[in-house]
């Protein structure tokens, strides 16, 4: 079952694992998974409210475990972060996502933006900037089409190193969005001083908004705040027409959610993009 609270997966709970299988086993499995190419990316489209066009996709990682079946990020990303495997995993994700974007371009889906989730630890690796530069060059892609999604916790733990890496990446043309906005404890000063280009309103607010007036007011206030800072807003977790109508009324800029399209494997995504462009 998927938790409605977008952040709960971050608290890693060993009880999720089968009895008798230790964390160390799963870590060894994950190490092997990286070598054996057991990871896959699914993509969720992002819709621009005004034009109705799909302007980008977010890459979301899954693990096709030989015995456990398809694992969701909450089942292995926390372990990857704790064990340091998030570094090679993160590079795998970036590399695969850029290959897939190149393939999508070849299918005629041009001018798509690609968003990839970045864990705080990935900043600690000194190779991030140079690796990205090389990958963009090798694939003939413009960094301007690329976006990293960061959570507030990652941003709050920022060091001067994180800030300088963000600035160097921004210089290259890469953009940053602040994910799960509203769930952390970010001071608004961070919002004003970090090179953030976009806010992603956490799906918890979007989902409670139709039931609770307080959440509705919060959503409206957060959208207004973002716009005062000249930041466009992506609303996540849009699951019904009522949520969509409210978000339109409040002036949200972009939407993601099951109502538009659930995360899809690459070929299904391509078919969706084709159908959507014709409709
Ligand atoms: P996120 O970045 O906030 O991603 C949005 C999550 O909401 C995704 O869960 C997506 O499948 C789900 N979602 C999308 N639309 C809806 C909707 O309408 N309703 C509901 N209830 N959920 C919706 P997913 O794929 O399980 O990913 C969970 C989290 O794992 C992500 O949250 C992200 O923080 C992390 N993650 C995923 N891929 C990566 C990755 O490659 N690297 C890192 N570091 N983290 C990743
Ligand atoms: Ca999830
Ligand atoms: Ca995200
Ligand atoms: Ca989010």
Image (cartoon, grey):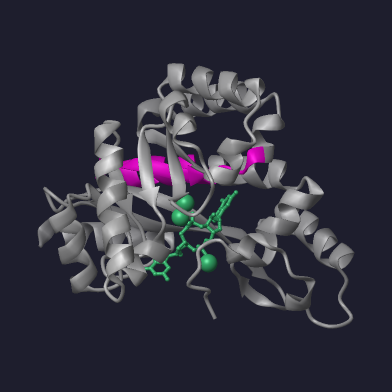
Q: Residue at x 41, y 51 (%)?
A: 58
Instruction: Give, as a single range, the part of the protein colored magenta.
Output: 96-120
In the picture, measured across the screen, residue 41 lies left or right of residue 161, that is: left
- Residue appearing at x 47%, y 27% in the figure: 194
| Residue with the most extreme front position | 214
**Rendered-image quadrant of the N terminus:** bottom right
Q: How many marks?
A: 0
Q: Can you say whether 79 is above or below 2 in the image?
A: above
Q: Is residue 111 magenta?
A: yes
Q: Is residue 111 left or right of residue 33?
A: left
102 in relation to 217, above or below: above
Left or right? Give the position of 50 relative to 182.
left
Q: Position of residue 191 (x, y in %)?
A: 43, 33
Q: Position of residue 73 (x, y in %)?
A: 60, 62
Res. 95 image quadrant: top right
Q: Residue 246 sits in which quadrant?
A: bottom left
Residue 232, visible in the rendered structure: no
Q: Which is more toward the observer, 107 or 151?
A: 151
Is residue 99 located in the magenta-colored stretch of the structure? yes
**Residue 257 image point, x, y percent:** 33, 64
Residue 237: x and y, percent?
Answer: 36, 64
Residue at the location (27% across, 63% down)?
A: 216
Observer-nearest residue: 10 or 268? 10
Is residue 209 in sight in this rendering? yes
State which quarter of the image contains the C terminus: bottom left
Q: Residue at x 89, y 81 (%)?
A: 20
**218 and 63: which one is in front?**
218
């Amino acid at each position: 079952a998927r938790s409605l609270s977008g952040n709960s997966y971050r608290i890693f709970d060993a009880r999720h694992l089968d009895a008798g299988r230790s964390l160390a086993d799963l870590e060894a499995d994950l190490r092997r998974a990286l070598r054996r190419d057991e990871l896959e990316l699914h993509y969720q489209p992002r819709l621009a409210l005004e034009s109705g066009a799909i302007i980008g996709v977010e890459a979301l990682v899954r693990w096709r475990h030989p015995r456990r079946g398809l694992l969701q990020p909450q089942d292995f990303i926390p372990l990857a972060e704790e064990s340091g495997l998030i570094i090679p995993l993160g590079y795998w994700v970036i590399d695969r996502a850029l290959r897939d974007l190149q393939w999508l371009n070849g299918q005629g889906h041009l001018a798509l933006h690609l968003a990839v989730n970045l864990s705080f630890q990935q900043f600690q690796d000194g190779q991030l900037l140079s690796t990205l530069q090389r990958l963009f060059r090798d694939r003939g892609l413009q960094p301007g089409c690329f976006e990293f999604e960061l959570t507030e916790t990652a941003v709050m733990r920022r060091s001067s190193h994180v800030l300088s890496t963000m600035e160097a990446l921004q210089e290259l043309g890469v953009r940053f969005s602040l994910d799960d906005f509203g769930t952390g404890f970010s001071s608004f000063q961070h919002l004003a001083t970090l090179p953030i280009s976009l806010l992603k309103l956490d799906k918890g607010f979007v989902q409670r908004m139709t039931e609770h007036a307080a959440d509705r007011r919060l959503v409206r206030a957060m959208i207004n705040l973002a716009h005062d800072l000249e930041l466009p807003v992506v609303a996540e977790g849009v699951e019904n027409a009522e949520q969509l109508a409210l978000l339109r009324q409040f002036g949200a800029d972009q939407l993601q959610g099951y109502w538009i399209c659930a995360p899809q494997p690459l070929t299904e995504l391509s078919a969706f993009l084709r159908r959507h462009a014709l409709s």
